[in-house]
Image: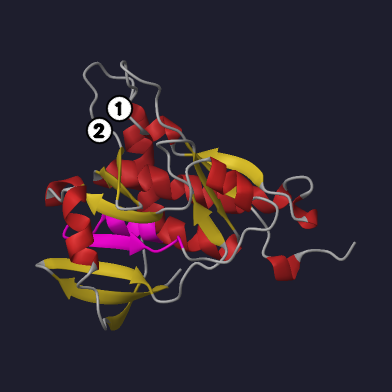
Amino acid sequence: MRVRLRLFQAAGYRVVQPWRPLRHTALSDPEGYGWLVGDREGLARLAGLFAFAAYSRHTLVHVPLRDGAPIDGDECFLESCGGRVDLLLAHHSLGFPASRWPGVRRRLAGGTPMSVRPDLERAVRDAAAWEGRVERQGFRDWLRPVTHARTLCLTGSRDVFACASTEFAYALERGPKQKRVSRGDAARVASLTGLFEPEIARRRRELDISYKQHPSALRTR
């Protein structure tokens, strides 16, 4: 799968965005309840973008999601969960603080086209390696969420980003097979919750992934 991107050099950082917005994909803030709902194209591109983030240590991956099309039948639920947020992926080795994001975002202008072919097969192998280590004592290789300036910043390693990529790929595979999706219902089929660090002082943050068919593909009742 090839993913077309827009490349920026802003405030000393290399930033990429999808070339075309993910118009029928939305994300609510996991400070309330994290819910990502997307169509086939949105989930496919997110699988690719997470895989790209896994192997691109020096690149911030920004996915604008706040201004997409209304998600028919679920927009009120998104708002009740904390409202729509954008998504930002940052490899932990970059040491990028979420508080710096608004200043970087203000400098995103123009951009140049580029395309990448994320290594999804390698992502499957690296995800299996993460799953093989997760039960070890002292394990700390978690996906770390911070919401700032209406953007969910996820920071992690190669392997945990690879795990997230496979969750989106699974949602893409299983979502269209679920009951009632042909009538426009969203089907929860995957989750990133298990990639977040369990928290003692507060509940573990949740981020579920749902498939929702593109409006143009819905059957006529």
Q: Earlier in the sequence, mark 1 or mark 2?
A: 1
User: Residue 193 occupies which quadrant of the picture?
Assistant: top left
> Does residue 54 appear in the picture of this structure?
no
Q: Is residue 213 left or right of residue 114?
A: right
53 or 96, which lies in front?
Answer: 96
Image: 128 above or below 1? above
> Contact (CB < 8 A) between labels 1 and 2?
yes
17 or 97, which lies in front?
Answer: 97
Q: Quadrant of the C terminus?
A: bottom right
Q: Position of residue 153 (x, y in %)?
A: 30, 48
Q: What secondary structure is marked by label 2? A: loop
Q: Which residue is mark 2?
A: 141
Q: Residue at point 78% right, 56% down? A: 182
Task: Point out the stretch of residues depicted in magenta.
Answer: 49-66
Q: Position of residue 116 (x, y in %)?
A: 34, 72
Q: What secondary structure is marked by label 1? A: helix
Q: Which residue is mark 1?
A: 133
37 or 166, which lies in front?
Answer: 37
Q: Residue at point 48% right, 48% down? A: 83
Q: Residue at point 43% right, 44% down? A: 29
